Image: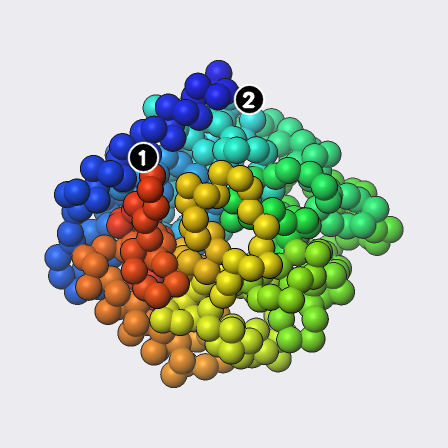
């Protein structure tokens, strides 16, 4: 059973772990690639790939999803499958798919039902070719639950004025571009799988989505109509005048948007707004226009103009498609940062210092290191 006490104990565990790690951090030796290989190996705990070595020794559906493609490319197919089996068994026990599975194997949502947990889990299953026959009942039930909770079928988008977990949990967003990309990714992935597909059955916004191509075209037009301003994608449907890293990364990463001219425009705007300085990628370049929940004061700037390394290598992969020299310079900066810190640090302040707050110190060994290894 989860509740305030469970969240409190999990929170205290993270605080204690980060304080201990700050006093005696583990420093990895070697070149950047050697450091990242060691971190990925360490994040395998014998049962599953945990998200990090200090703060997050749990299974997080979204983080695992960000890493699955690279882990497969690096030859970890068996361990990817074992991680998925571990997670799905825990979800079976809970009776639903959640954001997180605690170090003791308890599945829970933090802090709310997440728009991106099911999409990233399904995506991981698909691209790793995991045999999910034993989990059909669970997956189909959760797809139906997702459709009921998340989807505004009339608009074809994520419902508004609803609290969901997602990236940037501390910021208050209304119909974020990232969340709608997650909806689109799930809708497209279901066409490749033997699972219940409500999008094919019911369509969205009065449109028939009877093929994967029709689904991709529908969401490509919809995301452009709702979020594209001619230069970059808005963070959410408030359409405030700032550029957000995640909103301009995931339309391309998920394959919803494929236009090269828009990718080039986004790269230009990200550089102009200095979201790639001193290295990529920041959420925003300022906290001024972003509204945060009250608890953010304990983690000030954790999700404002901070540099997040789960996005950095993914962004570099996009840049590689249109500007190899710029991508090479970004990778060189990451190489220097990894070797300087002896680890793959979770998050940095805007000026490149390792993030810390009165209650939290950034993790130094993230599973995300696998994405650097596949640049």
Judge whether 299 appears above or below 280 on screen: above
**Label ID, residue 152:** none
Q: Please give left or right for residue 187 compared with residue 373 in the image.
A: right
Q: CA distance from mark 1 to mark 2?
A: 29 Å
Depth check: 21 or 30 in front? 21
> Among all residues in the image, which is located at the extreme top?
1
Q: Give the vertical position of 99 relative to 276 (above or below).
A: above
| Residue 250 appears anywhere in the view | no
Q: Is residue 246 left or right of residue 14?
A: right
Residue holding disc 2: 95
Residue at image coords 20%, 37%: 20
Q: Position of residue 136 (x, y in %)?
A: 58, 31
Q: Where does label 1 land, which residue?
A: 15
For the point 64% across and 52% down, which residue is it?
176
- Residue 72: image x %, image y %? 37, 53
Going by the picture, which residue comes out furthest to the right? Answer: 206
Pinpoint residue 245: horizontal percent, then vertical percent: 52, 63
Picture residue at 70% right of the left edge, 34% below the top: 149
Question: Quick check: can you spot residue 177?
Answer: yes
The crowding category of the residue bearing disc 1, from other C-alpha atoms within 10 Å (few below 14, some 14 to 19, many at least 20), is some
Left or right: residue 301 versus residue 116 is left
Asked which secondary structure carries label 1, the reply is helix
Badge 1 or badge 2: first in the primary sequence? 1
């Amino acid at each position: 059973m989860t509740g305030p006490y469970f969240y409190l104990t999990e929170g205290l565990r993270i605080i204690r772990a980060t304080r201990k790690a700050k006093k005696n951090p583990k420093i990895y030796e070697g070149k950047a690639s050697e450091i990242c290989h060691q971190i990925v190996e360490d994040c395998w705990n014998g049962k599953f790939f945990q998200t990090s070595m200090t703060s997050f020794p749990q299974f997080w559906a979204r983080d695992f999803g960000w890493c699955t493609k690279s882990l497969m490319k690096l030859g970890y197919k068996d361990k990817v499958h074992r991680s998925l089996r571990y997670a799905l068994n825990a979800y079976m026990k809970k009776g639903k798919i959640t954001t997180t599975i605690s170090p003791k194997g308890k599945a829970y949502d933090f802090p709310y039902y997440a728009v991106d947990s099911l999409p990233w889990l399904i995506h991981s299953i698909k691209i790793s070719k995991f045999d999910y026959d034993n989990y059909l009942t669970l997956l189909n039930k959760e797809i139906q639950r997702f459709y009921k909770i998340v989807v505004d079928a009339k608009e074809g988008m994520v419902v508004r004025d609803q609290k969901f977990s997602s990236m940037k949990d501390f910021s208050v967003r209304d119909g974020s571009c990232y969340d709608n990309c997650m909806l689109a990714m799930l809708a497209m992935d279901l066409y490749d799988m033997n699972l219940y597909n409500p999008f094919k059955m019911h369509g969205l916004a009065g449109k028939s989505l009877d093929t994967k191509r029709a689904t991709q075209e529908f969401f490509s037009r919809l995301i452009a109509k709702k979020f594209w301003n001619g230069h970059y994608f808005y963070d959410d449907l408030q359409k405030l005048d700032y550029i957000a890293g995640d909103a301009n990364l995931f339309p391309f990463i998920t394959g919803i948007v494929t236009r090269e001219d828009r990718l080039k425009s986004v790269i230009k705007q990200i550089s102009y707004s200095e979201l790639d300085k001193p290295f990529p990628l920041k959420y925003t370049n300022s906290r001024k226009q972003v509204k945060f929940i009250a608890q953010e004061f304990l983690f000030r700037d954790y999700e404002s103009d901070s540099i997040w390394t789960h996005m950095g290598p993914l962004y570099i992969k996009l840049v590689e498609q249109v500007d190899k020299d710029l991508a090479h310079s970004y990778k060189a900066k990451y190489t220097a940062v990894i070797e300087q810190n002896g680890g793959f640090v979770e998050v940095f302040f805007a000026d490149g210092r390792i993030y810390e707050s009165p209650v939290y110190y950034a993790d130094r060994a993230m599973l995300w290191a696998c994405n650097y290894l596949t640049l």
